[in-house]
Image: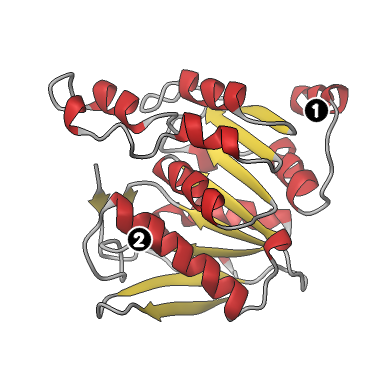
Amino acid sequence: MFFPKKKLYSTPLDFNLKYDDVDISLDNGNNIYGWYIYASKPTSKTIIYLHGSKGNLSTYLSEVAKLHEVGTNILVFDYRGFGKSQGMETIKHSIEDALTMYDYLIKTKNIKPEDITLFGFSFGGAVALELALKRPISSIILESTFSDLCRISIRKCSCIVAPLVSKRLLESDKNIKRINVPIIISYAGKDQVIPITHSKKLFDNANSPKYLYEIVGAEHQNISEHLTAEYISLIKNVVVNGKVIDKNSFDNLVSN
């Protein structure tokens, strides 16, 4: 399920973003590499960006640059096996790496849990939910995320391969029921990889306050080209301003 790339094709400097390299050594001799991107104005609000199962952190930098408009710091990193992060790519390692980066924010950057938001794209959304069960956070954004690993494996692989996937792995539709923070669930309107029914099931299972947002015209791999000011405004209101948006206000926002 993993398709990592080692070569980095760009850095935050290519998007005029100020950043520091983050390189954390693990006890087993491997490391996790990422970028801590600073907000345009000083703030403690920080998003941990958890990317998908393909490419590396540079693959997702165009969306990270758009997300930067929200006004937070952003920590984006590669799971083991991706980019400059060493080691074997596995689901278990990806979750452990997310925990390591969260702890880095707390211990090294002195960021408080109430200022941390998790942003998970595709596979990264499932990792975000696993992380949210293990550490306190402020809010979550899930973008084009599958509701259950076994269910998506049937679609992407086959009914023969799917039974080999443990039903205990990445059960996002069950995990989300145990999380009680504001959550935005967004999906690409023309997603050809993960059907929108997955996002809708996650939304149905999520606790309030929750928001379901369609990224109109987007496919799974080109979401950054379709991000709107309304989407950024929704994220900013929930993540930075800490607002609970009522139904009428939300309907007005997404219809403009």
The crowding category of the residue bearing disc 2, from other C-alpha atoms within 10 Å (few below 14, some 14 to 19, many at least 20), is: many
Q: Residue 161's quadrant in the figure?
A: top left
Q: Position of residue 123 (x, y in %)?
A: 40, 42
Between 156 and 226, the one nearer to me in the picture: 156
Q: Quadrant of the N terminus?
A: top left
Q: Amino acid at mark 1?
A: Phe
Q: At 66% from the left edge and 39% from the top edge, which residue is drawn?
A: 183
Between label 2 and label 1, give the one nearer the viewer.
Answer: 2
Question: Spatial distance from mark 2 to mark 1, Cα to Cα?
Answer: 34 Å
Q: Amino acid at mark 2?
A: Tyr
Q: Helix or strand or loop: what does disc 1 sit on?
A: helix
Q: At 61% from the left edge and 39% from the top edge, which residue is drawn?
A: 227
Asked if residue 201 is positioned above or below residue 46 in the image, the reply reads: above
* Residue 224 in view here: yes
- The residue carrying mark 1 is 250
Q: Position of residue 225 (x, y in %)?
A: 53, 40
- The residue carrying mark 2 is 79
Q: Helix or strand or loop: what does disc 2 sit on?
A: loop
Q: Earlier in the sequence, mark 2 or mark 1?
A: 2
